[in-house]
Amino acid sequence: MVSWMISRAVVLVFGMLYPAYYSYKAVKTKNVKEYVRWMMYWIVFALYTVIETVTDQTVAWFPLYYELKIAFVVWLLSPYTKGASLIYRKFLHPLLSSKEREIDDYIVQAKERGYETVVSFGRQGLAFAATAAVTAAVKSQGAITERLRSFSMHDLTAIQGDEPVGQRPFQPLQETKKKSKSVSGESAGVLICLIYFSFTIGILSPGGY
């Protein structure tokens, strides 16, 4: 565990941060020689990262595995050994040059297939969303219909004040007359009170009767 932590720290600091800073310096100063050197390093380091991902899962049990990783990163980075430049010039550049056309064709095909895959998934997603929306709408309509059907005529007539005029309960003529008489009596009483009140005010006011 300790060896793994030390190797990760060395790779992060010396294998990534240090080259990244000097790559920035090369771009800033526009030093072509340094720029080419660090570009070769990053190409080799990318290949190293891919291989490291596989070896960490397969041969990490090998004695001194993490120590060898640290030594290899230092060898790649050192300006004395120039390991990255050596690997690139001797192996990677000839290999990439011979396979460049095939790699480019494969990348183009991958882009086209990726675009077609995205479009296909988009269409499937839209179709699924439309189907789900229609299904939800149909279910909601069915639920509302069943709810309305569940009301009985007694439930509908129990709602006060909502009946049409022609369907309101019939009131007998005698009850109607009683209500009219009561309303007339109340109106007459109010009128008498008003007359009496006016008469009283006229007597009490100065210059009254």
Image (cartoon, rainbow, N blue to C red):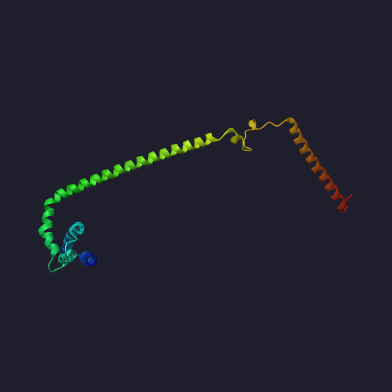
State whether residue 112 is above or below residue 96. above
Q: Residue at x 13, y 51 (%)?
A: 99
Number of marks: 0
12 sits left or right of 33 in the view: right
Q: Nearer the viewer, residue 115 or 64?
A: 64
Farthest bottom residue in view: 80
Which x, y percent locates residue 197?
83, 48
Q: Residue at x 43, y 39 (%)?
A: 136
Which x, y percent locates residue 109?
20, 45
Q: Residue at x 32, y 43 (%)?
A: 122
Q: Residue at x 78, y 41 (%)?
A: 186
Where, quadrant-wise, is the N terminus in this rendering? bottom left
Q: Nearer the viewer, residue 94 or 50?
A: 50
Q: Determine which quarter of the picture holds residue 113.
A: top left
Q: Nearer the viewer, residue 82 or 67?
A: 67
Farthest right residue in view: 209
Q: Determine which quarter of the picture holds residue 130.
A: top left
Which x, y percent locates residue 38?
18, 63
Which x, y percent locates residue 174?
75, 31
Q: Nearer the viewer, residue 16 or 206?
A: 16
State whether residue 180 is above or below residue 77. above
